[in-house]
Image: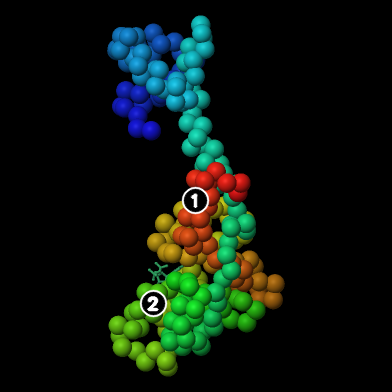
Amino acid sequence: MDLSKRQEQIIAIVRENGPITGEKIAELLNFTRATLRPDLTVLTLSGILDARPRVGYFYVGNQTSSVFGELLRKSLVRDYKSVPIVVNEQTTAYDATVTMFLEDVGTLFVVRDAGILCGVLSRKDLLKLAIGQTALKEVPISIAMTRMPNIYTVTPETSIYDAGKLLIHAQVDSLPVVVPSESANGQWEVVGRVTKTTITRLFVELGESKQV
Ligand code: ADP
């Protein structure tokens, strides 16, 4: 809902000073009580302010957005991640392209033994090779991938909200979900992926008010 500047001023005053009477708000803003009446009605009906007789107005907050935000912060990557599609460093650019088509993904994770994350390969990385007229059936993807430690990752315990923020901040489509490797110290094992589709799917589920 779009609030007018005056309505935002009223909210700020009530947040600071509530409970506060309508007369007092009007006084602080240099308006008459009658001028403010429609604004106070809108803010009360929309659930942002509450009014108690003989006490005044107090701030309740925008319940809808805080419930939505809380859901996103409580939803964990662990419960929404999908299966990672992985290849190894020696895979040729041609085979990686075929894998992207067969698996219907835009990003491949590049791993060493025991699923240790060493790179990420996106569509654009492959397109760059194609533009350079590289021999796609001969070159390994290791020459085009983004390497560790320059890879943005999340863990199963990361919230969907934080994962979404990272996708936007890093301007990437896909994040590997990793856990510390049991066999290789200081390395990360890939156990899943979170993509813009993961976030969009949850968004749609919430929109349909399905049990999530
Ligand atoms: P696309 O190439 O389809 O636009 P991205 O925007 O995800 O896909 O990828 C852009 C660049 O960022 C590529 O060079 C890719 O290797 C790199 N990249 C992709 N995902 C990540 C990630 N999680 N962390 C770091 N770099 C990444």
Q: Position of residue 123 (x, y in %)?
A: 40, 74
- Amino acid type, mark 1: Val
Q: Which mark is residue 115?
A: none
Q: Residue at 46% across / 60% down in the picture?
A: 196
Which residue is painted at 34% across and 9% down in the image?
33
Cβ atoms under marks 1 and 2 closer than 8 Å: no
**Which image quadrant for residue 189?**
bottom right
The image shows residue 155, relative to residue 211, as above or below, that is below
Question: Percent x, y for residue 89?
Answer: 51, 84
Residue in the foreground of this view, choosing between 195 and 166: 195
Q: Label 1's element?
A: helix
Measured in 3D between alpha carbons, the distance from the residue under mark 1 to the one under mark 2, in whole angstroms, is 30 Å
Residue 119 location in percent, x, y?
Answer: 50, 76
Nearer the observer, 100 or 135: 100
| Residue drawn 45% across the image and 22% down it | 45
Identify the residue shown where x is 69% and y is 76%.
183
Q: Indicate which disc residue 204 carries.
A: 1
First in sequence, mark 1 or 2: give its number: 2
Does the image show residue 119? Answer: no
Q: Is residue 180 left or right of residue 197?
A: right
- Quarter holding residue 134: bottom left
Percent position (x, y) of residue 144?
41, 81
Q: Quadrant of ligand 1?
A: bottom left
25 horizontally vs 190: left or right = left
Q: Secondary structure at mark 2?
A: helix
Asked whether 182 or 175 is in front, the reply is 175
Q: Is mark 2 within 8 Å of ligand 1?
A: yes
Query: In this rendering, would 98 be left or right of 83?
Result: left
Disc 1 crowd, CA 10 A, few/some/many (<14, 14-19, 20+): few
The residue at which mark 2 appears reads as: 125
